[in-house]
Amino acid sequence: TQSTRPQRLLHAVQKNATRGDPRSVVKAIDNFCRQKEWAMNVGDEKGCILDSVVSEVNPVTVLELGTYCGYSTVRIASLLPPRAKIITLEFNPDYAKIARQVIAWAGLEDKIQVVEGPSGEWIPKMKEQFGVKTFDLVFLDHWKDRYLPDTKLLEDCGLLRKGSILLADNVICPGTPDYLEYVRNSPRYKSQYFKSHLEYTKAEDGLEKSVFLG
Ligand SMILES: CCNc1ncnc2c1ncn2[C@@H]1O[C@H](/C=C/CNC(=O)c2cc(-c3ccc(F)cc3)cc(O)c2O)[C@@H](O)[C@H]1O
Ligand SMILES: [Mg+2]
């Protein structure tokens, strides 16, 4: 039977990356997406901005919305201090399966928890199920019309503290207009746009970094 793009991306990792070397996994995916098949990973250009924000925040608890194949999950986890953890939510079981194998190839299983299911169901359970108090960093990269409702849900569930950072992919392309309007106009956030390009293309895109002010 015909393989899927995520399956072909995983095979490219297993063929070209070194087991236990997260950066070689990131490189292998970027090469696959540039040379063979485009895929919706945050990519190498926006990935450098992601790296700098992660390094600056030095988070102990991270939440990622939308794992897909685990590219940004691995990229973030490779920069986390020893006891830090990332919980990543993915509701497509086929994608979750691929992501777990990409994460295993990178040797980052101990830092990453892939949780299968929709963010709307799991965010309210974070405290009771995973012993999370608040998140230091949230990376939003799932359905673009869910960024705003899930941000409000995170606020309502008390999962953000003064200084928590929201980093959102694709605020220009495909775009998240309602989310942008909210974080840029709400008195509860200090927002900053990092201009870049849509992964593996010349189209404009960017990341929006928003600090929750409490
Ligand atoms: C129902 C909301 N809750 C969710 N909870 C858990 N996982 C979710 C959820 N939504 C979506 N997901 C998962 O996140 C991923 C979805 C990501 C959506 N991303 C995009 O559409 C996207 C799209 C583009 C893009 C840009 C230009 C194009 F021409 C074509 C595509 C670029 C990107 O960087 C993107 O992130 C999938 O793995 C999906 O199964
Ligand atoms: Mg994206």
Image (cartoon, rainbow, N blue to C red):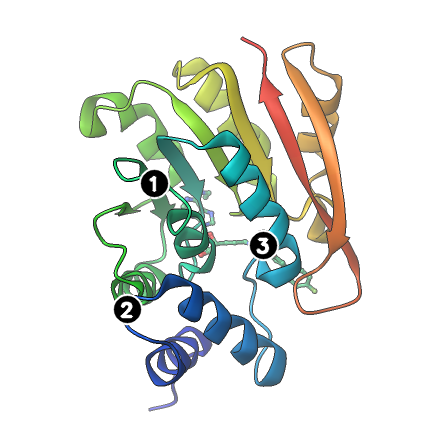
Q: What residue lies at 39% left-to-right and 89% top-to-bottom?
A: 2
Looking at the rendered structure, the number of numbered marks drawn on it comes to 3
Mark with earlier residue (1, 3): 3
Left or right: 84, with 209 as reference point = left
Report which residue position mark 1 lands on: 86
Look at mark 3 in the image and give the residue it sits on. Answer: 47
Residue type at mark 3 is Gly
Q: Amino acid at mark 1?
A: Ile
Residue 203 placement: quadrant: bottom right
Residue 76 location (% of width, % of height): 44, 48
Quadrant placement of the N terminus? bottom left
Neighbourhood count class around disc 2 (C-alpha, 10 Å): few under 14, some 14–19, many 20 upward = many
Q: Residues within 10 Å of mark 1 (few under 14, many from 20)?
A: many
| Residue drawn at point x = 36 percent, y = 85 percent | 15
Say what amino acid the circle numbered 2 marks.
Trp
Q: Earlier in the sequence, mark 3 or mark 2?
A: 3
Name the mark on residue 105: 2
For the residue labelled by badge 3, is the local secondary structure a helix, a strand or a loop? helix
Question: Is ligand 1 less than 8 Å from the beta carbon at label 2?
Answer: no
In this rendering, is residue 105 above or below 15? Answer: above
Image quarter for residue 132?
A: top left
Residue visible at 70% across and 43% down in the picture: 171
Disc 3 to disc 2, C-alpha distance: 19 Å
Q: Are marks 3 and 2 in contact (CB under 8 Å)?
A: no
How far apart are the two marked residues, 2 and 1, measured between alpha carbons?
17 Å
Q: Position of residue 93 (x, y in %)?
A: 30, 59
Q: Earlier in the sequence, mark 2 or mark 1?
A: 1
- Identify the secondary structure beneath mark 1: strand
Q: Position of residue 83 (x, y in %)?
A: 25, 35
Disc 3 packing (10 Å; few <14; some 14–19; many ≥20): many
